[in-house]
Image (cartoon, rainbow, N blue to C red):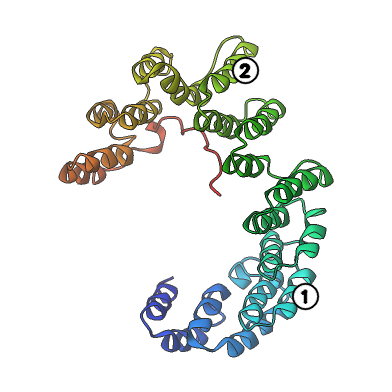
Amino acid sequence: MAMEFNARLLARHGCAEEAFTLLRRHIGELPLGILVDVSGAAGRDEEAAVLVAARTEHRCSDFPWCCKGGDRDTAFGYLAVIRERQGRTDEAIALLRAHSISLLSNREQLAAALARDERLDELRAMAATDDSGSAVRQLARLLEERGDVEGAIAAYRQAGEAVGGTCSAFELAQLLARHGRGSEAIDVMRVQADIHNGYDWVLHALAELCLDQGRPEEGLAHLDALAAARGGEEEWDLYWLRLPLIAARDGVDEAVAQARSHIEGATRYAAPHIAELLASAGRTEEAVAVLEQHSSSNCSDLAGYLIDLGRVEDAMAILLQPAPSRRNRGRPLARRAPVL
């Protein structure tokens, strides 16, 4: 690791040649990615291609240990990076086609290469069978950049049908919302929330859309229906999703009051959500007061708010406290929607 960091440091500061020479002497001891990254800056892509190609001939006997986590398909992916960088796009795409069946990263790389070369027909064909969603994401992005929003939307919908609905509904909803079609975006995520009953990240995406579109009551109605179907009980993992919606509809004080009335509202894992409500309303001092009651479990959030208030020394003191033992930690926060 020290050698890898040293090589990257050298390359960032105009010493890529020196970095490449260092790495070349230890080619069998390091991941291939660092060699490929540095070779471009050093102007030694062809030499790197020879070294990477040699790795494609190796048959792993004890993967991932014998190859530093880089099997033959991974090596072909790195070789494709070099070839595309050299302007040999057809060769790079051919390599990725031949070695993308079992390796997700190569499928993602292939889709990205097709998009960069604007090969729409090939991207469409790939999107129809690629259940990873890589091809349709690249196709939709390319169409959107060209101004063909309808084409991008159709690509998501058609790919979803072709591969059994595994196309990312979340990305489709975001696309619709970006182009002023918030109602359709909410409908897309509402269908997903019905299919994936109780999935917190799906519900979070739906709630965020309702909030962004100024329709918090719709998000609350869905969460209320879900709670009713479960006998009126909601654990904090799902309950916290309604708090920003309540704040938008009824005000922050009402949202905080409802949060505190929940059976888990006084716990260490509820505190960050309550603090976020207060801080978003400009009431950072109150947010700090909430988190200080559970400072050992929420030190990062607390330190951030202290820094916002200019209390840097207090933030440092919080961060330098010994971490609590694992058995004393609270429940983890619910998963958020994916970052694209």
* Picture quadrant of residue 313: top left
The disc label shown at residue 283, or none: none
Q: Is residue 14 left or right of residue 185?
A: left
Mark 2, other Cα within 10 Å: few <14 / some 14–19 / many ≥20: some
Q: Residue at x 63, y 41 (%)?
A: 176
Question: Which residue shows up at 65% across the image and 32% down it?
Answer: 189
Q: Position of residue 73 (x, y in %)?
A: 71, 70
Query: As shown in the figure, which amino acid type bears the numbered disc 2?
Result: Leu
Instruction: Tell me which corner region of the image, top left, top right, bottom left or bottom right, holds residue 96.
Output: bottom right
Residue 166 percent across, percent down from the top left: 74, 43
Determine whether 206 is above or below 75 in the image. above
For the residues bearing labels 1 and 2, Cβ distance under 8 angstroms: no
Whole-angstrom CA distance, mark 1 to mark 2, is: 49 Å
Instruction: Specify the quadrant that holds the N terminus.
Output: bottom left
Q: Which of the numbered marks, if any, corresponds to residue 94?
A: 1
Q: Secondary structure at mark 1?
A: helix
For this rendering, which residue is in front, 51 or 148? 148
Residue occupying the point 73% across, 46% down:
156
Res. 310 in view: yes
Instruction: Report helix, strand or loop for mark 2.
Output: helix
319 with respect to 80 (left or right): left
Residue at screen point 56% across, 23% down: 219
Q: Work out whether residue 62 can be spotted.
A: no
Q: Position of residue 46 (x, y in %)?
A: 61, 89
Q: Which of marks 2 and 1 precedes in the sequence?
A: 1
Write down the quadrant of residue 226 in the picture.
top right
Residue under numbered circle 2: 226
Residue closer to the observer: 38 or 25: 38
Q: Amino acid at mark 1?
A: Ala
| Count of numbered labels shown in the rendering | 2
